[in-house]
Amino acid sequence: MTNAPASAKTRTPYDDFETDAELEVKGIKVDYDDYWFHLARAGGANEAFAQRLNELTQPYKRAIETDSMSAKLSAKLTRQAFTDTVLLGWGSKLHGEGKMLARDKSAIPFTKEAAMAYFEELPDLMRDLLTTAQKGHLYRKELASADAKNSGSSSATS
């Protein structure tokens, strides 16, 4: 091990793993080209997701402990916590900010109720978004700054 001086290009774990607490709460744009979602982080400085999921699962504590909760109920509770605390908005190229594409390409205005129904029909989309929202590296200030320079807003691709 040497005590060589660090160069300006030397990276530290802080460069690779430190997240921006403000960005974790205010959210990032997850862009799928024709449509997008605005997501707060599910974790990190945004503790709301875990708190909300805990609140929603309290009545089912025994079922969770005995591993007898149905997958359908578990998915519904996760969907509720996600739409209440992580999903901040959505949009599409066809209809603009705040309006998602329906199957027939009509506009679905953003509401928590609409999001719950949308994700019930498209559970793989919600799982993909939740997985994305749990990736701390997407909430690094350095990444958000680079994306903002490239697109005019914070974005992440999944």
Image (cartoon, helix red, strand yellow):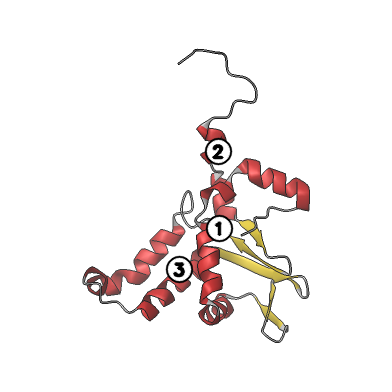
Q: Position of residue 61 (x, y in %)?
A: 26, 70
- Contact? badges 2 and 1 (CB < 8 Å): no
Q: Secondary structure at mark 1?
A: loop
- What amino acid is at disc 1? Ala
Q: Secondary structure at mark 3?
A: helix
Q: Which residue is mark 1?
A: 40
How far is mark 2 from mark 1, CA to CA? 19 Å
Q: Secondary structure at mark 2?
A: helix
Query: Which residue is rendered at x = 22% and y = 68% of the image?
Result: 65
Q: Which residue is mark 2?
A: 16
Query: Which residue is rendered at x = 28% and y = 74% of the image?
Result: 60
- What amino acid is at disc 3? Ala
Nearer to me, 147 or 49: 147
For the N terminus, the quadrant is top left
Nearer to me, 130 or 98: 130
Instruction: Indicate whether 113 appears above or below 98.
Output: below
Q: Give the mark nearest the N terminus, 3 or 2.
A: 2
Q: Which residue is mark 3?
A: 81
Nearer to me, 157 or 107: 157
Please identify the residue farthest to the bottom as the structure is shown. Answer: 104
Residues packed near mark 3 inside 10 Å, few (<14), some (14 to 19) or many (20 plus): many
Instruction: Indicate whether 75 appears above or below 20.
Output: below
How far is mark 1 from mark 3, CA to CA? 12 Å
Q: Is residue 104 left or right of residue 19?
A: right
